[in-house]
Amino acid sequence: MAKRNPEPTSPPRERAFLVGAEIYQEKNLLTLEDSLSELTLLADTAGLDVVGELTQKMDRAHPQTYIGTGKVEELKTLCEETLATVVVFDNELNPRHQRELEELLAPNVRVMDRTALILDIFAQHANTSEGILQVELAQYQYYLPRLTRQWTHLARQGGGGGGRSGGVGGVGLRGPGETQLEVDRRQIRTKIAHLKKELIKVSEHRQRYRAQRKRSKIPTVALVGYTNAGKSTLLNNIAKADVYTANQLFATLDPTTRRVDLPGGYNGLFTDTVGFIQKLPTTLVQAFHATLEEIAEAELLLHVVDISHPNALAQYESVQQTLIKIGAEHIPVLTALNKVDRLSDPDAASAILEQYGQAIAISAKYGTGIPELIQKVKEELYETFATIKVFLPYQQGQLISLFHEAGQIDRIEHTRGGVMIHGRIPGRLVAQFNEWQANHPPKEVEEAEV
């Protein structure tokens, strides 16, 4: 009897030791313990087995090793006892911290921080050309200042593409000397400049696409929320879509837009976006600028919150802070408290609603509350009006026409430089007029009329 070929086996998962430090002067939304629990989930998503954790509370970070020298010795011993080959810090390390720690720990132990871990997860989950470009840019920007003589060329990172290449962090073997380092730095700076140019093209393409959507008169709704809050599941439910979902962090990286029928014959374009997380790396915010524009340009934000999570309120606040960071704080927000089916007492969700302002309790998985949510979205998009007074130069003909078509004009005054309009417009359109809100014509227009 012929022997069957053995099934291919997955490579063994690396053993990781986690380190969390709490600096008294710094304000964090999560406690040290909860933040480390989240880091454990990130490590698991990245393909690491967590074998232990070490914590320290201190007044300030150590200038050389972040944690104190005594803790470094303790960490070295723990790594040897647990056979850990990766140390992951929950705090962001500067290049010196990482270099000093790797010198003091065992030669086979690599050191990385939360940012590097998230970058590794993104590299695994990036499938589209846009996602790969964004992840690759973030990786290069992160690793450029961290080049040392232990560098083994960033090409091992692979730039995403959904697979692991070079392992977590991508550094660790003895490599070339200082001359080669300068060559590497020059090559990486050239690569960063090229990627930025490519992403500018992506951004311009998205802008043209958004302009087409605006001409269609169909308002856009961006689904935002903490990672694994259930945004993709909600979009699949309301749009009968097939967006990939998984019970893991950062399952969705690339934005997906679907048309949704609203009550009364109205429509809306709903866009699923990348999930947020506390301590969101600055490099990711910069690299994913083209994608995050989908949020900043939306006319309504649908903030999905996992109400069953023990840190739901902290996650909510973290998302709110990120929206401010990307310039989307002015957009109307409707909150969906998701996963009420996981609550031991689903009725308790009603008592929680007041903590989240304008919120509706739902279950994206089972459809609970979805009709009420869709009705509320329709009201926000088409029935909620805001009083506004704007001065629009005649060159802004599209905005003048938009006010006439979608708004209710109480008074209009024509001047030589433009038109002053007093009236009401749908709340979803207010953002488009923010630049032109005024109590009187701009100074340059007044001077031109004198």
Image: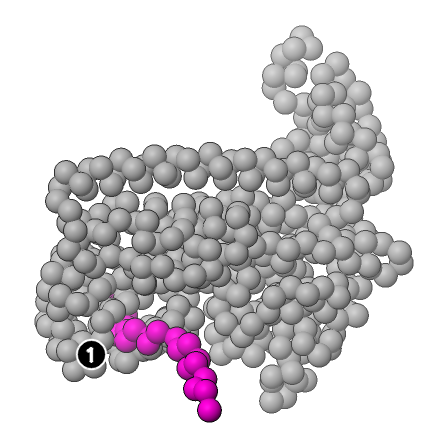
User: What residue is shown at x 16% (from left), y 61% (from top)?
Assistant: 102
Q: Quadrant of the C terminus?
A: top right
Of residues 62 and 247, which is closer to you in this image?
247
Q: Is residue 213 left or right of residue 323?
A: right
Q: Is residue 120 above or below residue 147?
A: below
Residue range highlighted in magenta: 1-26
Give coordinates of residue 437: x percent, y percent.
66, 34
Specify the farthest residue to the right. Answer: 264
Q: Residue furthest bottom?
A: 1
Locate residue 329 relative to residue 314 in the image: left or right. right
- What amino acid is labelled 1 in the image? Leu
Q: Which residue lies at the image location 70% right of the left edge and 37% below the top edge? A: 211
Residue occupying image coordinates x 42% and y 82%:
6
Whether 341 is drawn above or below 115: the answer is below
**Residue 314 in picture, x, y percent from top left:** 48, 68
User: x, y percentage for residue 178?
Assistant: 13, 41
Q: Is residue 3 magenta?
A: yes
Q: Nearer the viewer, residue 166 or 253?
A: 166
According to the picture, the residue beneath numbered tag 1 turns out to be: 83
Can residue 132 be seen at all in this image of the molecule?
yes
Query: What secondary structure prevails in the magenta region?
Result: loop
Q: Quadrant of residue 238?
A: bottom right
Taking depth in this image into account, of 171 and 92 the one nearest to the observer is 171
Whether 43 is among the magenta residues is no
The colouring scheme, among rainbow, by chain, secondary structure or one colour, is: one colour
Q: Judging from the image, what secondary structure is the residue with disc 1 in?
A: loop
Q: Is residue 333 left or right of residue 214?
A: left
Q: Is residue 325 visible?
A: no
Q: Residue at x 49, y 56 (%)?
A: 126
